[in-house]
Amino acid sequence: MSISPIHIVGGGLAGSEAAWQAAQAGVPVVIHEMRPVRGTDAHQSDRLAELVCSNSFRADDWTGNAVGLLHAEMRRCGSIIMACGDTHQVPAGGALAVDRDGSAEAVTAKLETHPLITISREEIAGLPPAEWDSVIVATGPLTSPALSEAILALTGEGQLSFFDAIAPIVTLESIDMDVAWRQSRYDKEGPGGDAAAYINCPMDKAQYDAFIDALLAGPKSEFKEWENVPYFDGCLPIEVMAERGRETLRHGPMKPVGLTNAHNPTVKAWAVVQLRQDNALGTLWNMVGFQTKLKHGAQSEIFRTIPGLEKAVFARLGGLHRNTFINSPRLLNRSLQMKVEPRLRFAGQVTGVEGYVESAAVGLLAGRFAAAERLGRLLAPPPETTALGALVGHITGGHLEGGAGSFQPMNINYGLLPPLEAPKHDAQGKRLPNKERGRAKKRAMGERALADLDRWLADAPSLAAAE
Ligand SMILES: Cc1cc2nc3c(=O)[nH]c(=O)nc-3n(C[C@H](O)[C@H](O)[C@H](O)COP(=O)(O)OP(=O)(O)OC[C@H]3O[C@@H](n4cnc5c(N)ncnc54)[C@H](O)[C@@H]3O)c2cc1C
């Protein structure tokens, strides 16, 4: 019996990985890639899986880094992006950096010569034809305007963003609650009945003044010429607000009204930085209104001057870029299908993940989900204890709705995985010093993830051996 093809729109990192996974499972695929017929503002070639900027897949250590764990999981799933990256790696210490031409050429050659893959060089300039009953949209942060408009018409106003306006996210365990306290402004109850929904960090006048000076002086990233990002009033970078007047932030996102410092009730804070819970697990907290173009190094340094955040661990730092992405938590189900039109799956950066590896990882899952469906099998998402499962869990439900624009792209990080008690002893039963427990915890989370991933792969044997 012949199997009809899965259509993949976009042959970037996600589309290439999705195509490989589906074809390796025995399902035919057609990749529709618009380059070189139509270019983007960032791609330079007509190769599939081109890296548009840096050549790094970041840290490669599964025992101590969340993206390293994602690498390890993807390798176990037979990822083409990881295999070609490994073959074409260049020296970069603990990171996996790749020869960008070599790796993209290798991916292109493997896909071009795969007997079940056809590559069609064309732009899909609207919703994919109705007769395509299984489609993966993997058109990335620079999705062509005609397709973006069609997606917008399908999803509705406010469900597709053309820019990310990212505020930093801090892990809960790194916030000093002897300084910060929980309270909602005016103790107002939220829909869930919680009157202490925010974490508040107080500043006195001297601290606020020093903070404003640091914001004004700190190095900022520039927009690329073609990005042409307009500032919307709701997402002005904090340094732009500070430039408009020293008091602007104190009357905006840092206003101290309606809040009483639980540790020092008689002294009114001059300004307050608020953090709002960002994920259902409650492990990640978003700095409210703190989108910024400050360089990453400066962000860590300046934000750690905020009382309570001196030891902050940032799961994500702020930014503002051109980026097309959908409101996945609302629009997609757990197998990445659009709820209102299940023949359409989404993958890659357009789903609201951030980064080469994360984009390819979501492509990997979309390819597997679509192939399983074609083969008449049910494929559950990977367990939430794995990096792959955590990523898909976050974009399809783990993120907490916090008003318009609250869902913003995210890299993989440990805060997306269910927490684990830090081990107190090593394998020999020797008590671990405090400073080594964090490292031991990451290793334990990695071990848990890989064991759970192996069980998931064993449950789907026909899709397990994609190499
Ligand atoms: C300028 C820029 C720099 C970045 N730098 C980094 C970085 O250094 N490190 C990092 O980890 N991440 C970076 N990213 C983020 C992200 O990881 C990459 O964009 C990554 O390539 C996303 O993978 P993807 O498969 O989702 O999209 P892409 O790799 O962009 O693939 C999408 C593909 O779809 C095609 N396409 C678009 N519309 C259509 C259409 N209508 N019909 C047919 N084909 C279409 C495009 O030509 C493209 O080939 C950057 C993003 C941008 C925009």
Image: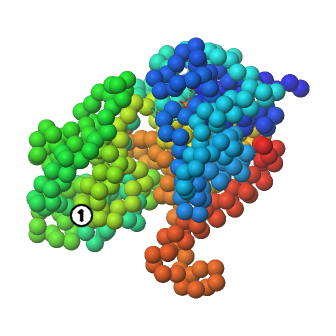
Disc 1 marks which residue? 307
Can residue 442 be seen from the camera position used here? Answer: yes
Residue 407 location in percent, x, y? 42, 41
Q: In the image, is residue 68 above or below residue 229?
A: below
**Quadrant into which the C terminus falls:** top right
The quadrant of the rendering that contains the N terminus is top right
Tell me, yes or no, if residue 191 can be seen here: no
Where, by quadrant of the figure, is residue 435 drawn?
bottom left
Residue drawn 81% across the image and 48% down it: 461
Q: Residue at x 43, y 54 (%)?
A: 315
Q: Amino acid at mark 1?
A: Pro
The colour scheme used here is rainbow
Query: Which residue is outermost to the right?
Result: 1
> Label 1: how many residues lie within 10 Å, few (<14), some (14-19) or many (20+)?
many
In depth, the one of 205 and 198 nearer the eye is: 205
Residue name at image x 52 percent, y 24 percent: 44
Q: Is residue 444 above or below residue 75?
A: below
Q: Residue 224 falls in which quadrant of the image?
A: top left
In the displayed structure image, the side of residue 370 where residue 264 appears, left or right: left
Q: Residue at x 15, y 40 (%)?
A: 243
Q: Secondary structure at mark 1?
A: loop
Q: Quadrant of residue 312?
A: bottom left
Q: Where residue 253 sits in the image (x, y, percent)?
A: 22, 47
